[in-house]
Amino acid sequence: MTYDLAVWEGPRPESDESAAICFAQLLDRPESDPHATADPTPAIRAYVDALLARWPDITEDAGEDSPWADGPLIGNASGSSIHFSLVWSAAEEASEFAARLAHDHGLVCYDPQREALRPPPARASTRPTRRSWFRRNP
């Protein structure tokens, strides 16, 4: 059993539902579409390189403890997107890292298992601002 994530370039969808539509469109691209079989873009390649800096590719000798379910990891990338799988036993830690890293790289991360964007959008704080307990007299 594996845990999947999809990461792509572009504006962040406004909702999980919109992201699900984008994800479905990525999966449904015909092989004749040049974006479906293109070399990874520099942004996607940099993202994969950063993932592999944390955990090695399973195709390497040091990759036996890697969370990636297949390799080479870059082989899951095509054009401006990557759809990759994690081993279930490492999915929690690795998916959290991968989602945070995608955000840091300005990429969109969608989790098909949760049918949700990751990380979730930041919410505005509703807590009042903190004020000092006393005032100083001038």
Image (spheres, helix red, strand yellow):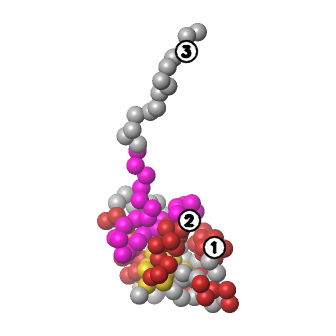
Image quadrant holding the N terminus, namely bottom left
Residue that appears at 34% across and 64% down: 16
Residue ID for mark 1:
54
Label 3 residue SS? loop
Q: Nearer the viewer, mark 3 or mark 2?
A: 3
Which residue does the numbered mark 3 point to in the structure image?
136
Disc 1 from disc 3: Cα separation: 50 Å
Q: What is the quadrant of the C terminus in the image?
A: top right
> Where does the magenta region start and end?
100-124
Can you say whether 56 is above or below 47 in the image? below
Is there a contact, CB below 8 Å, between mark 2 and mark 1?
Answer: yes
- In the rendering, at what x and y percent does residue 9 appear? 51, 67
Label whose residue precedes the other's in the sequence (3 or 2): 2
Instruction: Indicate the quadrant where residue 20 lies.
Output: bottom left
Return the residue found at the far top.
Answer: 138
| Mark linked to residue 101 | 2
